[in-house]
């Protein structure tokens, strides 16, 4: 075809340039999966199967060196891949074995692989990065007197490691924590290995833990400190392990030995404990909360040492976090506005335990909560 009309040629040039523009990707932008409360959490287009996260710890005032490996499956054609991540420096990204370009947009790490990933294809992402424990009030790492712990609920896992930070996408986790000899690292799940550093790194030790069940990012836990790991047996041989400041173990033992009976009581109410292990992590930090991190619930140690807390109340909080292992952890909300499914059940069982064991009327506890609820809502 030969173009003869100038006007037609101009129209075709406009059409051609429009095609050119359409072929260029739009600018990187933070994406989400449409959670009504957290529109930018999670990311579309893939399903994470496993996280393998390696941290190298030196001191809780310094960023950790980290490598996060994600095995996922693309659920649609992806020219770009968004991960949730902030509070760290990204040094390199690989997608399916090839180096990839990356930038940040909002609290997303936006990755452009050399080759687009087809729907249904495996998607392997490796991010080499740092993880800054000075996140502060926003959550993520919690700096303790002797190291670090983690508190990611609801939207802070991506302040620690790159992830699809939404409970709608649960995955299996492996943590590899390298820390100076003399410190103990514990994470969700069971230990796989503890390896001393080689000749070059005799002063360090690497601890490896793996979950046997899928987990939401908000429930990840990594504890590093001068800790004692205390083991005992729960109902039907369930391995229990508590993580406490080593110097305080004798003082805390009367509380720790209550857990097997708590589990037996919960199992009578709702059925078999859903995970491979359980225990409490008592951190030397002022968090103002306890958190049901999967298989290893986080508490501030002062709750167990400050005698102003009534004993029935402390036990009720212990049962509350234990109940979350069923409600919130094993069964997980698909949107954050369904958080009441976690908290409603955990509050119910914590309060019921106090009624059955310490004559704290459940009705009175609920009436008190109802009286205060408008204030809590406002806060
Ligand atoms: Zn709760």
Image: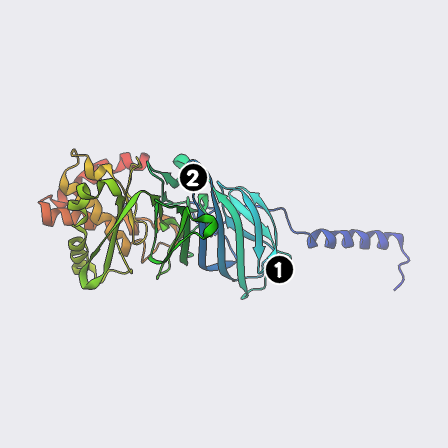
Say which residue label 1 marks.
Answer: 116
Crowding near the residue tagged with mark 2, few <14, some 14–19, many ≥20 C-alpha atoms within 10 Å: many
Say which residue label 2 marks.
Answer: 133
Report the residue at 16% width, 33% height from top: 308
Residue 200: percent from left, percent from top: 48, 49
Can residue 345 be seen?
A: no
Residue 179: percent from left, percent from top: 40, 46
Left or right: where does residue 13 sit relative to residue 342? right
| Label 2 vs label 1, nearer the camera | 2
> From the viewer's perspective, is residue 271 above or below residue 161?
below
Residue 203: percent from left, percent from top: 41, 46
Q: Quadrant of the N terminus?
A: bottom right
Residue nearest the viewer, comparing 107 with 372: 107
Report the residue at 57% width, 57% height from top: 95
Numbered tag placed on residue 75 in the rendering: none
Residue at the extreme bottom of the image, as rendered: 120
The number of callouts visible is 2
Crowding near the residue tagged with mark 1, few <14, some 14–19, many ≥20 C-alpha atoms within 10 Å: few
């Amino acid at each position: 075809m030969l173009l003869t009309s100038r006007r037609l040629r101009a129209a075709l040039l406009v059409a051609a340039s429009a095609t050119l523009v359409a072929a260029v990707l739009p600018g990187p932008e933070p994406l989400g999966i449409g959670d009504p409360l957290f529109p930018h959490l999670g990311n579309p287009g893939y399903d994470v199967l496993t996280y393998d996260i390696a941290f190298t710890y030196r001191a809780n005032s310094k960023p950790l060196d980290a490598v996060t490996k994600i095995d996922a499956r693309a659920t649609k054609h992806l020219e770009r891949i968004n991960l949730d991540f902030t509070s760290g420096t990204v040094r390199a990204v690989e997608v399916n074995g090839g180096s990839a370009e990356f930038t940040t947009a909002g609290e997303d790490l936006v990755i452009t692989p050399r080759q687009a990933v087809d729907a249904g294809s495996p998607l392997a992402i490796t991010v080499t990065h740092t993880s800054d424990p000075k996140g502060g009030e926003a959550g993520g790492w919690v700096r303790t007197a002797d190291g670090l712990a983690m508190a990611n609920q609801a939207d802070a896992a991506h302040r620690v490691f790159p992830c699809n930070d939404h409970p709608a996408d649960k995955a299996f986790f492996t943590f590899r924590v390298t820390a100076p000899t003399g410190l103990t690292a514990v994470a969700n799940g069971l230990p796989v290995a503890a390896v001393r550093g080689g000749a070059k790194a005799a002063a360090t030790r690497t601890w490896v833990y793996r979950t046997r069940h899928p987990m939401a990012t908000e429930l990840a836990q990594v504890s590093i400190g001068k800790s004692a790991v205390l083991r005992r047996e729960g109902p039907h041989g369930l391995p229990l392990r508590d993580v406490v400041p080593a110097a305080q173990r004798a003082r805390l033992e009367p509380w720790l030995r209550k857990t097997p009976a708590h589990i037996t009581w919960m199992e009578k109410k709702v059925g078999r404990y859903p995970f491979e292990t359980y225990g409490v992590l008592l951190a030397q930090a002022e968090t103002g909360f306890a958190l049901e991190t999967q298989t290893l619930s986080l508490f501030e140690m002062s709750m167990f040492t400050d005698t102003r807390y009534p004993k029935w109340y402390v036990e009720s909080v212990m049962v509350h976090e234990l109940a979350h292992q069923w409600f919130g952890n094993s069964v997980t909300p698909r949107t954050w506005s369904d958080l009441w499914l976690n908290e409603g059940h955990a509050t119910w069982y914590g309060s019921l335990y106090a009624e059955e064991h310490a004559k704290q009327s459940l009705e009175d506890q609920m009436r008190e909560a109802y009286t205060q609820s408008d204030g809590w809502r406002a806060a």
